[in-house]
Image (cartoon, coloured by chain):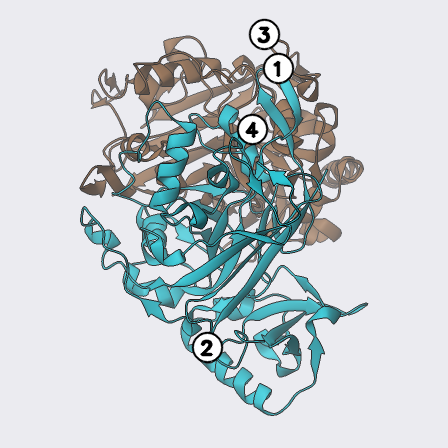
Chain colours: A brown, B cyan
Amino acid sequence: MTGYGLDNLPYGVFSVPQGERRLGVRLGNEVVDLSGLGGYFAAPSLNPLMAAGRPEWTAAREAVLDYVASGPPTTPLHAVTLHLPFDVADYTDFYSSEAHALNVGRILRPSSPGLPPQWRHLPIGYHGRSSTVVVSGTPIRRPYGQLGAGSYGATRRLDIEAEVGFVVGVPGRRVTTGAFEDHVFGVVLVNDWSARDLQAWEYRPLGPFLAKSFATSVSPWVVPLSVLAPVPAPAQDPEPLDYLRPAGPAYDLKLSISWNGTVVSSPPFASMYWTAAQQLAHLTSNGASVRTGDLYASGTVSGPSPDQVGSFLELTANGASPVTLADGSQRGFLLDGDEVVISATSADGKIGLGSVSGIVVG
Amino acid sequence: MTGYGLDNLPYGVFSVPQGERRLGVRLGNEVVDLSGLGGYFAAPSLNPLMAAGRPEWTAAREAVLDYVASGPPTTPLHAVTLHLPFDVADYTDFYSSEAHALNVGRILRPSSPGLPPQWRHLPIGYHGRSSTVVVSGTPIRRPYGQLGAGSYGATRRLDIEAEVGFVVGVPGRRVTTGAFEDHVFGVVLVNDWSARDLQAWEYRPLGPFLAKSFATSVSPWVVPLSVLAPVPAPAQDPEPLDYLRPAGPAYDLKLSISWNGTVVSSPPFASMYWTAAQQLAHLTSNGASVRTGDLYASGTVSGPSPDQVGSFLELTANGASPVTLADGSQRGFLLDGDEVVISATSADGKIGLGSVSGIVVG
């Protein structure tokens, strides 16, 4: 299995039947148990390692490489249960794909399409619910809510948002873009499940609430930031304010969205307008603190072409132009029983980010 | 000191110099140390007691009353440091005062004044940042941010929002309004500090973000829900959907806002349109879970008359009509060095909710 060699070694939390939660790394399709290494490796979550800071992250990686080289016993992936790899502190979500913001504006606000006026000046974001961040594979129960005035029921417009999430290790405030790699431990994939009918009715003026808060899925393996090769950030016009400069690293990740086994879109993360370093700088620019376990997501990753969008709202023009899946069935939004798998690798295919999946249950 | 007798006994977390954090109750202007009672009383936060559930809350109260009756040693309030009384899980804020929503709509959205279309159908809310919930007395550093396109600096429109906060003890999802008192442990006062210039620039379409996330202050004493006498909920038109019925208890609390010692407003909590039971039912109606330590705030409490508003945005018409303080100085928004104290009691004065204060530092 390419993508999960010694140059990756993502961290996760696993258990075997009747066993306790343990830290491990993924090597190919096997899990290496790290708990015997003691210290922060003996914790049942990544938080102590994440809090230890960048020099310790480097030392930990060397220790893990030495251990893996010693030929330790491994457990097949299919024989373990994977858990949420870290305890989520605050969860924040951004809106940093220009194509996505333009698509959503055109679909949801046809009378005033285009980007919000501040969109190119700051990375727009909002806070989400931490208690409902779940690990990949957790069934997603179709949420209920108000579909309009006097109307209550199960959402009819259940959607996904394919995103990349950044996990904070070291607490901070006023984190400069240059200090990004000292604070962010690693990367996960995120599916920000969304109920579009609830959202349209509730979101003015305080933003999305119940349309998002029922579930946010994350991939089980946290890829250390240090294994991802940075690429130059995209050009930004107007030039950002000082506190958002320099832009910091971008990452060329190729996402893939599978709907019941049919790949329906391939969003390119390199197309994001704002970088993760700028998002963190903005998030903390007012003096707010971030903590170990903070998760912040990029916002839906949509590239400029129709086969690169990160939501079904965009893919199907709000349900008006259904897609045809491999079995010949058509979809506007998610039906009960549907499964979505979002996976990603680095552009060169050398680093796998795993996948985040969920099956909709009624 | 009235309001803090045996019929109240609010819980808090205190320390004496060089001492550890301990659970206590307030009796008059004294603190009774509960840590010697063992069990959840020996924890350094209220979370274990809050998680124990309503029968245990009742038993705990009886144990505390017995202990207080035994004449235990007490420590004067002025000799202790008060801490955040519970570990905050998710923080949510509502928008449930009709007068406030109307005032804000008129000031911030003059082209479309009035209530948002869904306002009378559901309690509008959003998620805030948990990491910056601080205890009363914590200095509030004036936040920085974008004041408009290309403009970055310290906020010039630093404001308050006087609110009542509800602290969740027992986890749940789809919490009916009838189960409200089985899940909510107690009540605090909340000041949701707000930077109005940041907010106006950032909040469309995803809601307030950095304008709120720099600090949210809470009062140090959690008043058990069981000591507050419920009053009938306000009339609601249209009749709410089933999942928001019955409305559950309302509470007749009288808030008072002091600005550098001058009482500038007296918001009446009984005037809120949506009840705390309805807010919790709505918050969990989509299937989202709440946890021990979840804090949800009522939204700014503003009554219908000008001397009952819960924010300075409303009090001064967005700074256009400054108020005169007792020292003869005038204010539109907060200046560095200003102190705001929000306090409250039950309408009959028998139950004190203490106060939440903060001094602005530049």
Q: Which of the two residues, B153 or B345, is positioned nearer the viewer here?
A: B345
Labels 2, 4: front one: 4
Q: CA distance from mark 3 to mark 2?
A: 59 Å
Q: Is residue B61 visible?
A: yes
Q: Is residue B295 visible?
A: no
Determine which residue is flagged by label 4.
Answer: B198
Question: Pointers 3 and 2 in contact (CB under 8 A)?
Answer: no
**Residue B266: percent from the left, percent from the top?**
47, 54
Quarter of the rendering containing residue A4: top right
Seen in the image, is A16 located left or right of residue B359?
Answer: left
Determine which residue is flagged by label 3.
Answer: A237
Quick one: SS at disc 2?
helix
Labels 3, 1: front one: 1
The amino acid pointed to by label 1 is: Gly
Q: Who's the residue at 50% across and 75% down the image?
A: B8
**Residue B283: percent from the left, percent from the top?**
36, 49
Q: Which of the two residues, B262 or A279, is positioned nearer the viewer here?
A: B262
The amino acid pointed to by label 2 is: Glu
The C terminus of chain B, quarter of image: top right
The N terminus of chain B, quarter of image: bottom right
- The chain under label 3 reads A
Quarter of the rendering containing residue B147: top right
The amino acid pointed to by label 3 is: Asp
